């Protein structure tokens, strides 16, 4: 039995190996036969020699193997240095930048409208804030003092962040204010002012009639850019009338003309200075709830002053303010009625009772 | 007695060697029975069984596909086609026959198979045999 097993296993191995080789040969022959049938069919159907058409076209489409050229024979950076003339703006643009330039130039790309809208919005903001200062004076005393300031400041900062014209605006502010006082200077609301050193005395005088003019705190110590507050109103909430008078004295000499009355109530030259100051401070006290914190010192002083007067005024009946305003004559005029309404609106919140008596006392003094 | 019989009989049956494997496939069951009982050695029987199993389990087809893929990717097929072109140009496009091609192509084909492909295929066959041979 054993003898049978051993040769069998030995045979089996060699037989198995032989068997494996046989199977392998079978498979290879199968593959060759398959190929032969395929080729024979292609020959008989006529599509065996299709890739060899004729010598000419073979040579024409041969693979190119030269340096600086791809396999088709084309140069790689052929369009790199070429420039094209834009049909719209007639400028010479580099070829790789031509398509984006056309987009912006013709206003037809995806982002071109966005950029244009942004530019329009920022220029609108500048003109809009300018008109706000003039128009809302009479109407919205509440909003005028602090809210509008905040809004204007926001818009201003937005504008200066986005626009590429920031450098331009700075140039205007510093250098060319003599000529551009009219338009551009008023675009810059609270953060910037007008440098008074570049202006002549007449210009300064005219400026001071229309705007607050108090030297801005943050630029006071800077020699070059000491600026006047450009708020186009004599009732700029950031500064008191005392400050305004001081500035006028400083700039125009002790014989400075009286503070003009665009919107203000009682700043006239018929007043003695101390009386005018107390009255002014009292008026400031009326507005104090809405004044910005920079004026806290002055407003506190004025509140102390007016507190002492409170008990006296309560007893007096409330007079018709219009008559009082009319009686005062030359100065108040139209401005007083508007200012009176302003004051009444501003003080409605806190001390409605006292506003009328104090005002009436003022007009009594006047008369 | 079994040993004597074995010694007397040659290792490989003459008949089984002469008949190509195709005959094994096409045998009817009766003929197969007779054939096997008379002339087929154990080895032949084993071979037949193996081949049968190879076909029935689909392993043969799989091995064929693997071989074709390997030959194509190693470039054997393109070589053979180029050789065919030469043969056809030699013999003439109109009068070429399958037999001409087969005669020309097969020996060269067998020779040109890369060693890696051959080894891989043998490895697979041996694995199959080890698994299924009795």
Image (cartoon, coloured by chain):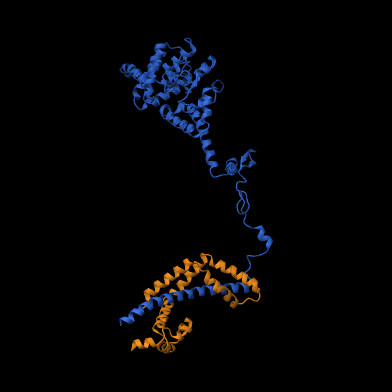
Indicate the quadrant where residue B33 lies: bottom left
Residue A98, position as x, y percentages in the image: 60, 43
Q: Which residue occupies the extreme right position in the image?
A: A56
B6 horizontally vs A22: left or right: left
Residue A138, position as x, y percentages in the image: 46, 26
Question: Looking at the image, which is closer to me, A334 or B8?
Answer: B8
Question: Looking at the image, which is closer to me, B113 or B10?
Answer: B10
At x 42%, y 70%, the residue is B124
Q: Which residue occupies the extreme top position in the image?
A: A255
The color chain B is rendered in? orange
Q: Is residue B88 above or below residue A174?
A: below
At x 37%, y 74%, the residue is B131
A111 horizontally vs A218: left or right: right
Indicate the quadrant where residue A49 lies: bottom right
The color chain A is rendered in? blue
In the picture, the quarter occupied by the C terminus of chain B is bottom left
In the picture, the quarter occupied by the N terminus of chain B is bottom left
Q: Is residue A47 visible?
A: no
Q: Is residue B55 visible?
A: yes
């Amino acid at each position: 039995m054993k003898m049978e097993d051993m040769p069998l296993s030995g045979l089996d191995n060699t037989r198995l190996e032989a068997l494996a080789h046989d199977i392998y040969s079978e498979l290879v022959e199968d593959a060759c036969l398959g190929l032969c049938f395929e080729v024979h069919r292609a020959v008989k159907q006529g599509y065996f020699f299709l890739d060899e058409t004729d010598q000419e076209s073979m040579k024409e489409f041969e693979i190119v193997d030269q340096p600086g050229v791809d396999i088709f024979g084309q140069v790689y950076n052929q369009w790199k240095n070429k420039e094209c003339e834009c049909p719209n703006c007639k400028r010479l643009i580099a070829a790789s930048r031509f398509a984006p330039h056309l987009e912006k130039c013709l206003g037809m790309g995806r982002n071109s409208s966005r950029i244009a809208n942004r530019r329009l919005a920022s220029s609108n903001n500048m003109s809009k804030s300018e008109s706000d200062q003039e128009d809302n004076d009479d109407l919205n005393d509440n909003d005028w003092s602090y809210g509008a300031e905040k809004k204007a400041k926001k818009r201003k900062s937005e504008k200066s962040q986005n626009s590429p014209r920031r450098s331009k605006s700075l140039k205007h502010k510093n250098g060319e204010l003599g000529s551009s006082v009219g338009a551009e200077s008023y675009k810059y609301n609270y953060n910037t002012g007008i440098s008074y050193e570049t202006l002549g005395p007449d210009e300064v005088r005219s400026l001071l009639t229309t705007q607050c003019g108090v030297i801005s705190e943050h630029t006071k110590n800077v020699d070059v850019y000491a600026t006047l507050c450009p708020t186009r109103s004599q009732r700029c909430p950031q500064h008191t009338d005392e400050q305004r008078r001081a500035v006028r004295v400083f700039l125009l000499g002790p014989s400075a003309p009286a503070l003009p009355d665009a919107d203000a109530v009682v700043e006239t030259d018929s007043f003695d200075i101390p009386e005018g100051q107390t009255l002014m401070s009292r008026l400031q006290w009326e507005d104090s709830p809405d004044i910005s914190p920079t004026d806290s010192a002055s407003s506190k002083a004025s509140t102390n002053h007016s507190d002492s007067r409170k008990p006296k005024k309560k007893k007096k009946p409330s007079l018709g303010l219009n008559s009082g305003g009319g009686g005062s004559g030359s100065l108040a005029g139209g401005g007083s009625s508007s200012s009176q309404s302003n004051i009444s609106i501003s003080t409605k919140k806190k001390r409605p009772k006292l506003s009328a008596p104090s005002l009436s006392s003022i007009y009594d003094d006047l008369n | 007695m079994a040993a004597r019989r074995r010694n007397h009989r040659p290792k490989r049956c003459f008949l089984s060697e002469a008949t190509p494997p195709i005959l094994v496939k096409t045998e009817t069951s009766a003929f197969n029975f007779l054939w096997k009982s008379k002339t087929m050695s154990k080895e032949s029987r084993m071979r037949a069984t193996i081949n049968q199993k190879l076909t029935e389990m689909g392993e043969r087809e799989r091995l064929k596909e693997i071989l074709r893929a390997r030959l194509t990717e190693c470039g054997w097929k393109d070589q053979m086609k180029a050789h065919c072109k030469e043969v056809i140009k030699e013999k003439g496009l109109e009068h070429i026959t399958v037999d001409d091609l087969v005669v020309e192509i097969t020996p060269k084909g067998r020779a040109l198979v890369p060693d890696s492909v051959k080894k891989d295929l043998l490895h697979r066959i041996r694995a199959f045999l080890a698994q299924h041979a009795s």
